[in-house]
Image (cartoon, helix red, strand yellow):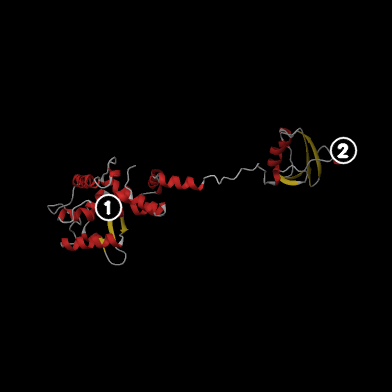
Amino acid sequence: MEYLTEEETAALVAAPNSATWIGRRDKVLLLVAVQTGLRNSEITSLCQKDVGFGVGAHVRCLGKGRKMRCTPLRPDVAAMLSGWLKEQGGRPDDHVFPSSHGGRLSADALQRLVARHVTTARRKCPSLVPKNVTPHTLRHAAAMDLLHRGVDLSVIALWLGHESTETTQIYLHADMQLKEQALAHATSSSLKPKRFKAPDVLLDVSGEAVIMPINQAIAVTESLETVGLKWLGGIIRESALSGNCRARQLPDYYRWAPLAAKETASASSSI
């Protein structure tokens, strides 16, 4: 998946010539695209009535499935967009980013717009040279920027208008930096590993009586040649607990310990 780094995004936004009307339009369009992550059709269909300023500046768009969503604007992006709309004038139904003829930008025009400014940005940012940057790449750049800033994946899914977080998980797999950070947490601490010692008393055959469920008692003792089982009613002496023992009606829990010599001699052989 192709996306832009912060340096590449800055180079792309700086590429348009602000001295011309088209350059100012393109600069604001690129800035809004990489900050909001709007889809191509959502950007070109934005109207002036869809933009809100003041406290909680945002843009509203009708996304996939005809679902309306609001995307917040950073203060710097809101200021740039506000200045552009003041320059435009016009009516609430006019497009925010019109074509040179005043109509809606086509998908092809948006594609050429991005390609033109990527070519310019490559002169100052060589890392853009091998990348195939399209309008959709700007959407990926917005998502990756949010992810790097620690925004939760579910919030990013809402931000982009994804149906579920499963679609958004591609951004987790796309960034090697996040994987390297995870690997750093798993790096060896240079401590020598110690020999494993089971912390569970059920695995500690030290001669002291322990309590365990029947299924665990059978699992532990099946491999032994001779086993002593001590329960509440007395002592059971069995040879290599096998399938026969499974069929008997034994208590749910056993108190088990290796039998002493005297205890073995006096033990009963059945329940």
For the residue labelled by badge 2, is the local secondary structure a helix, a strand or a loop?
helix
Report the amino acid beneath label 1.
Ala
- Hey, which quadrant is residue 90 in on the image? bottom left
Residue count near mark 1 (Cα–Cα under 10 Å), binned few <14, some 14–19, many ≥20: many
Percent x, y of residue 99: 15, 52
Percent x, y of residue 53: 27, 65
* Residue nearest the viewer, comparing 262 with 232: 262
For the residue labelled by badge 1, is the local secondary structure a helix, a strand or a loop?
helix
From the image, tell me which residue sits under label 1. 33
* Left or right: residue 196 compared with residue 167: right
Percent x, y of residue 267: 85, 40
Give the residue at x 47% y 47%.
Answer: 182
Picture disc at residue 205: none
* Left or right: residue 252 compared with residue 185: right
Q: In the rendered image, is residue 252 in sight?
A: no
- Hey, which quadrant is residue 86 in on the image? bottom left
Residue closest to the far bottom? 55
From the image, tell me which residue sits under label 2. 265
Quadrant in the picture for the C terminus: top right
Quadrant in the picture for the N terminus: top left
Percent x, y of residue 30: 25, 52
Q: Earlier in the sequence, mark 1 or mark 2?
A: 1
Give the residue at x 79% y 40%.
Answer: 258
Whole-Å distance between the Cαs marked 1 and 2?
85 Å
